[in-house]
Amino acid sequence: MDNKKEGSSTNNQENSIDVLHSTRTVIKRALDRLGYPQEVYELMKEPLRMMTVRIPVRMDDGSIEIFTGYRAQHNDAVGPTKGGVRFHPEVSETEVKALSIWMSLKAGIVDLPYGGGKGGIVCDPREMSFPELERLSRGYVRAISQIVGPTKDIPAPDVFTNSQIMAWMMDEYSRMKEFDSPGFITGKPIVLGGSHGRESATAKGVTICIKEAAKKKGINIEGARIVIQGFGNAGSFLAKFMHDAGAKVVGISDVYGGLHDPDGLDIDYLLDRRDSFGTVTKLFKNTISNQELLELDCDILVPAAIENQITIENAHKIKANIIVEAANGPTTIEATEELSNRGVLLVPDVLASAGGVTVSYFEWVQNNQGFYWTEEEVGERLEKVMVTSFENVYRVATSRRVDMRLAAYMVGVRKMAEASRFRGWI
Ligand code: GLU
């Protein structure tokens, strides 16, 4: 391993420890506010189950490589656990643990009959061939097959995994069990029981949160100035949805930097350029840095890239009235407090990014009943779930005088705590 890689994986390890630590801190605060005793926190601070597997895969050159994989099941008091599987060189046990806790929170916030789960394999899919990825995906399913299943734990796509990988995993599970099991996994291709609207579901959920937040702040979406950090799956779909809704997207960025136009960027053109070149900002001369982008004059700011972007160092420079977190953990706890005290309406990641798992739930319901919905039906149901969830969190934030993150955690832990109590676990 070269030094650069080693450095970045140490960073990632530290980031994962930070994420786990801050998630636990907010869970503790939420449980205290709700009046639950210490043992409820003890139950929730770790996943109930964590499985580590070693997966031998024959590579195309005939050699064998052994990959490490994980599956964490945070809490299954409410129902089966649910959450994505990521393929990434920096996947770690700590990260998978923290993300499984987040999935429990998300499921609680949007009121799905699930607990949280998460999985990952340490690998670099960008450097693997299709047949190698297929063998790895199937090997992972065989390795974790005892603890997963349509009524136990339901995987889904995540970082660097897609509908093709879900298809291989579903096929492997169905072969092992000797019956067709579409409900084993979500995010499948439509022809194998995938749901309409799953691909754009996260961005749709974020869009609905932006509209609801704008209503609360008396901001008209038509003409509202919005800045989006990140132009990946969530960021680019979101730019399109906001542009179509009449908002002015005045700033966007990718890893190479940001573009700014106070009169509004031409999103259709940028999407077209991105499709052909993989990046947008590299094609332009007048770019700004990602830090400058966050501080632009705008009404709505959407961090849709990576964690720890808004910290106590730059929180006071943020001009937006509304921040909607489409990325995981873009704002630190201290920055959340500073912004909320200033009256900025911050919609936290665990609420804003729950559109994906919500449509995954719809996919699972459709698989279980064998009756499929149109794109419009999925869209309407998603809208209902997101609007209701936003309202619930907003109500708790105003009535209990807490910021939206703490309010979301309070909503997120409550059902899990109650279900654990009724089951006699605590
Ligand atoms: N990986 C996505 C998430 O973190 C989706 C999970 C799912 O669809 O179950 O929300």
Image (spheres, grey):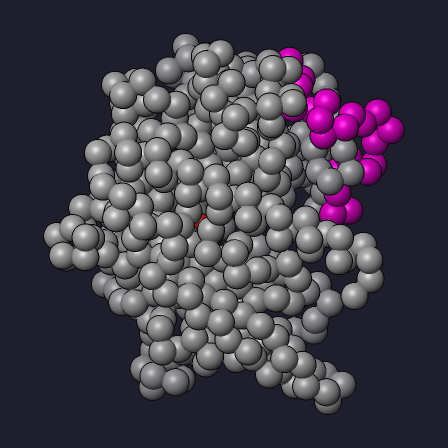
* Residue 366: image location, x then y, percent: 29, 59
**51 vs 159, nearest the viewer:** 51
Give above or below for 102 relative to 228.
below
- Image coordinates for residue 11, horizontal then vertical, percent: 68, 49
Counting from the top left corner in percent of width and height, residue 304 is at: 58, 36
Please tell me which residue is depicted at 69% across the width and 14% down the height of the picture: 262
Give me the residue at 83% from left, 31% from top: 284
Q: Is residue 57 left or right of residue 181?
A: right
Report whether 342 appears left or right of 421: right
Q: Is residue 21 left or right of residue 420?
A: right
Residue drawn at (78%, 38%) of the image: 256
Count the marks: 0
As drawn, is 322 to the left or to the right of 416? right
Quadrant of the rendered image containing residue 300: top right
**Does 284 lie within the magenta span?**
yes
Quarter of the N terminus within the rendering: bottom right
User: Quadrant of the rendered structure where residue 388 is?
Assistant: top left
Can residue 243 be seen from the camera position used here?
A: no
> Looking at this rendering, what residue extends furthest in the right direction?
285
Q: Residue at x 23, y 63 (%)?
A: 369
| Nearer-the-camera pick, 60 or 100 | 100
Location of residue 180 with respect to 27 vertically, above or below: below
What residue range appears in magenta?
Answer: 276-297
Q: Quadrant of residue 406?
A: top left
